[in-house]
Amino acid sequence: MKYGINLLLWTDTLSDDKFSVLDLIRKIGYDVVELPMFDKDVANAAKWGKKLDELGFLRSGTCAYGPDDNMISADPKIRRQGIETNKRILDCCAAAGCEKMAGNCLSALGVFTGSSPSKDEWQWALDGAREIGDHAQKVNVKICFEALNRFEAYFINCMADGVRFVKELNHPFVGMMYDTFHGNIEEKNVADAIRLTGEHLLHVHISENDRSTPGQGGVRWLETFAALKDINYGGWLVVEAFGQALPKLAAATKIWRRMYVSEEQLAADALKFMQKNMQ
C-alpha cells in the first residue's frame, strides 16, 4: 500500500516557494504527492516533476472545473472547451510524471440545472469521456472520476452512478475514485459502495467529514477500511484536507475556520491513522 497527501492542504498553486513542503512530506514518510493542476502550465508541471523525481515521490494530479469547462453544458462550445481543458491537464500530469488524474472532470463545481442529469447530459459526458480517455491513454495517465456530493455538483453523486458510467464507457484508462468525505454524505452504506466499485476503483481520497485530520471526525472509518480490504484494493490512499489558503476552491470547500493544530500535525497524524487501519 502506498500513502499520499494532496498539496491542497498547503496551496492550490505549484509555485517554487512550496518546494519546501515536499521535504516536509518526505520527512513525515509519505510515498505519494497529489498535485493541483489549476494553472494548466505544462512547463511548470515538468519542473515539479524533476523535483519529485529527485525526492523519489510517486504522484497523481487533480483539478477543479468551472462553468467555462463544463463537459455536460448545453452549449457545444463549452463542452469542447471542457474536453480541451481536460486534455491540457492530462498533459500537465504527464509532464509532472503523474500516474493518475483524479477529480470530477465531467462537470463544473457549483453549476446546477435544478434537476437530475438528463439523457443528453449523460451522453455528452460519455462522448467527452471517450475523447479524454483516448488522450489519457496516449499520455499514459489514468483518469479517476470522482463522485461529488450534491452540494457541489449534480452529475454522478454516488458510486453506483459512477460505476454505471465507467461500465458503459468501457475505457481501459478510465475508472473511479472514492472520496470518504463525499461518500459520508451521499452513500447509505459506505462499505457497500466501495465493494460495488470493486475493480473499477483506481484511487481513494482519505478525507474527514469536516475536511480536517482523518480519524478525528465522523466518517465511518472501520467500515471503509474493511471494505477496501475486502476488494483487495492495492492502489493509493491519498489524504485530502483543506486549509484556508485556497482562493480558487473557497466556494466549494467552504473552509472558514482552522480545524487542526498545524499542517504538519494533520499530515503526520493522518499517515499514522492510515497505516494503522490498513495493516
Image (cartoon, rainbow, N blue to C red):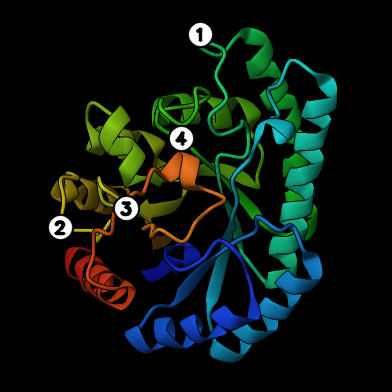
Please give the name of the residue rendered at 44% of the width and 34% of the height, measured from the top-left corner. Answer: 148
What's the CA distance linking mark 1 and mark 3?
28 Å
46 to 173, vertically: above or below = below
The amino acid at mark 3 is Ser
Q: Earlier in the sequence, mark 4 or mark 1?
A: 1
User: Which residue position holds label 2?
Assistant: 216
Residue 118 picture location, percent across and down: 60, 9
**Residue 9 seen anywhere in this rendered image of the structure:** yes
Seen at 32% across and 37% down, the residue is 183
Which mark, by number, is residue 207?
Answer: 3
Q: CA distance from mark 4 to mark 3?
A: 14 Å
For residue 24, what is the image quadrant?
A: bottom left
State which mark lies toward you, 4 or 2.
2
Q: Is residue 149 above or below residue 62?
A: above
Disc 1/disc 2 C-alpha distance (Å): 35 Å
Crowding around mark 3 (Cα neighbors within 10 Å: few <14, some 14 to 19, many 20+) is many
Question: Of the residues shown, which amino acid type is indicated by label 2?
Answer: Gln
The residue wearing badge 4 is 147
